[in-house]
Image (spheres, grey):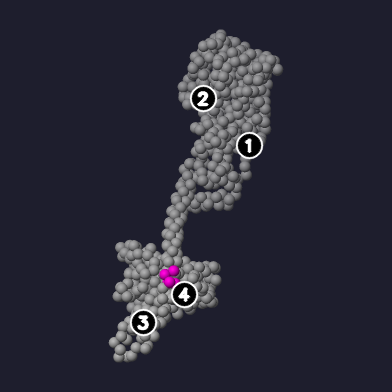
Amino acid sequence: MTQSYRNQLVFTIKDRCRVCYTCVRECPVKAIRIINGQAEVVSERCIGCGNCVKVCSQGAKVFLQSKYEVYELLESQQKVAALVAPSFPAEFEDIDDHRIFVGMLRALGFSYVFEVGFGADMVARQYHRLFEEIPGKGYISSDCPATTFYIRHYYPNLVSRLAPVVSPMVAMTRIVRYAYGADLKIIFIGPCVAKKAESPEVDEAITFLELRELLLERNIQPSGVQPSEFDPPRAGKGGIFPVSRGLLQATNIREDVTVVDIVVAEGKESFKEAIREFDAGLISTHHLELLCCKGCIMGPGMSKNGERYARRTRVARYVKQKLNPDQLKEWQENIEKYSSIDLTISFTPEDRRQPLPSPEEVEKVLKSMGKISPRDHLNCGACGYDTCTDHAIAIALGNAEPEMCLPYAIEKLHKSINDLNITNEKLSQAKAALKQSEKLAHMGQLSAGIAHELNNPLGVITMYANILWEECKEDDPMRKDLELIVEQANRCRKIVSGLLNFARKNQVNLSETHLPDFAKRSLESVVIPPQIKTRIVNEMKNPICFLDQDQMMQVLTNLEKNAVEAMPSEGGEIKLTLSDTPDEVILSLSDTGTGIPKENMDKIFTPFFTTKEVGKGTGLGLPLIYGIVKMHKGKITVMSNADPKQGPTGTTFTLTLPRN
């Protein structure tokens, strides 16, 4: 396994990602980037701990598979050795006899099968010497590759404090090559993903999960193999290395601060906290035994759902079985035999820290998510980050999205729902207005046809009625009848004229108009009782517009007369509000009258509809207004309340007209 592979240790299968942010929460270095709602691993920041693989319930996070490279080595003509991590009893709990397990590996094609536990024994001796020979200088254990990657990338200033001792895997590799030949191909088998990138001295590294797949694909069962023992040198107490405090136990050091200053920390948060305090000088004279996982027995290359303490017990039981006098004697001889092998290593810093954004950038991101005051910082952790500020920093760096914040997403959803409701309401109003427009357009066409057909015969009737009336003598009893005919004929002419105005096929004569002065003249043209107050509210920035003044005066005076007639006997107020935009002028006439009943609102522009007494209204006033406004390419809307229980009564007509 070459170091170049390390940048591809963990991948995301995007189709499986459900964006739960669990991987963000569990990644100790936040090497997860959320883009367009998908979580992807940032390879250059990843330390290979495999936490994201362990916690992803959807199987969206996977690690680099090396099965096929192992197949090729096993099928070649070269001798291949398996180095088995001491946590194997924790994984293969279904195999009681370790010799059956070794036999299965030999059946798979391995020429040799070694225990990495012996490498742990040798490494433990090195640590013991280091702790005793250099008092007062604290070291950080270097047997966990995820931890060493973390320090090299995120605390490069502490690289010199990494213990210059190889891991048990590398130690065993050097011992095996020394004893069995440098050409031997070596494959490490263990619970760790980061081991795949730890050292180029190992040809390949696979996890226990991959080994299970190899055995399954080759149909190798415990019942069908010949039991076999591990090849020497065999492990002693180093087999306890993968459990918590395994290093201390392997070195025979008691965890007693009165004897030696050693801090043990394991798990994604604890190991980081220990390093932070070490860097701050709080425990810089202590030795740190660190594991990124909660013991190697809980590594990402182990089967899921395993019980931690049950696994610990199986490892301890296996080590206890090995510590008999005969094996101890052989073990001691091998310790002396390989004591001259160099087990030192040096580490180089590889700084991969991202420059932090400025406080102003972070503050800008926080404000965009509605986090204005400290009370808005819930620090709920739903986004996967510990604090809202950490989340904002990740957003500023391009590693996260605002939508990851649950309160922000909920608030945004509520706003979207409100906006959608408003849009639906506007759409309903537009549909109602369109329906009314179509209805009135049909009425206009019908009215125009009727008016056109009636106009000519009505003109003849009016003309001859007037001639007969003028020729009739003053004392003629028929004169009174003819006068009635003339009066009603003229009334019919007005009705026909109203129908034509409603249909409005004629043109408008636009002229420059000072709208506030024009509105004032309209109010002066109407007889308004003293108990009714009137006022004009001018909010216009540009008072000039182009209107057909005669027709628009008819519109305003009709609306004003209707407002006067709608007032109760004690009076009220009529308000004419003028406002504008660069392209439109808006006139709103409001009254405090009795209002229009809800059931009449969709009929008010219909010709001949009136609520006035017979003979007092033709029902053509508002249709006439509608026709004139339509000719001006404007629109008219009305709001009214006739029910005092629902608030103040009154009606508001709003005319929106093009300025030019």
Q: Amino acid at mark 2?
A: Ser
Q: Amino acid at mark 4?
A: Met
Question: Which one is nearer the viewer's eye here, 215 or 205?
Answer: 215
Question: Which one is in front in this view, the residue at disc 4 or the one at disc 2?
Answer: 4
- Residue depicted at 39% across the width and 82% down the height: 464
Question: Which one is in front in this view, the residue at disc 1 or the one at disc 4?
Answer: 4
- Residue depicted at 58% across the width and 50% down the height: 361
| Residue span colored magenta | 449-453
- Circle 3 packing at 10 Å, graded few (<14), some (14-19), many (20+), is many
Residue 351 falls left or right of residue 486: right
Outermost residue, left direction? Answer: 477
Residue 422 falls left or right of residue 366: left
Q: Secondary structure at mark 2?
A: loop
Vertical order, 185 against 509 (above or below): above
Residue that label 1 marks: 44
Q: Secondary structure at mark 1?
A: loop
Q: Quadrant of residue 192?
A: top right
Measuring from the top left, give residue 422's x and y in whole percent.
Answer: 44, 56
Give the Cα distance between marks 4 and 2: 84 Å
Give the Cα distance between marks 2 and 1: 27 Å
Q: Secondary structure at mark 4?
A: helix
Question: Which one is in front in this view, the residue at disc 2 or the one at disc 3?
Answer: 3
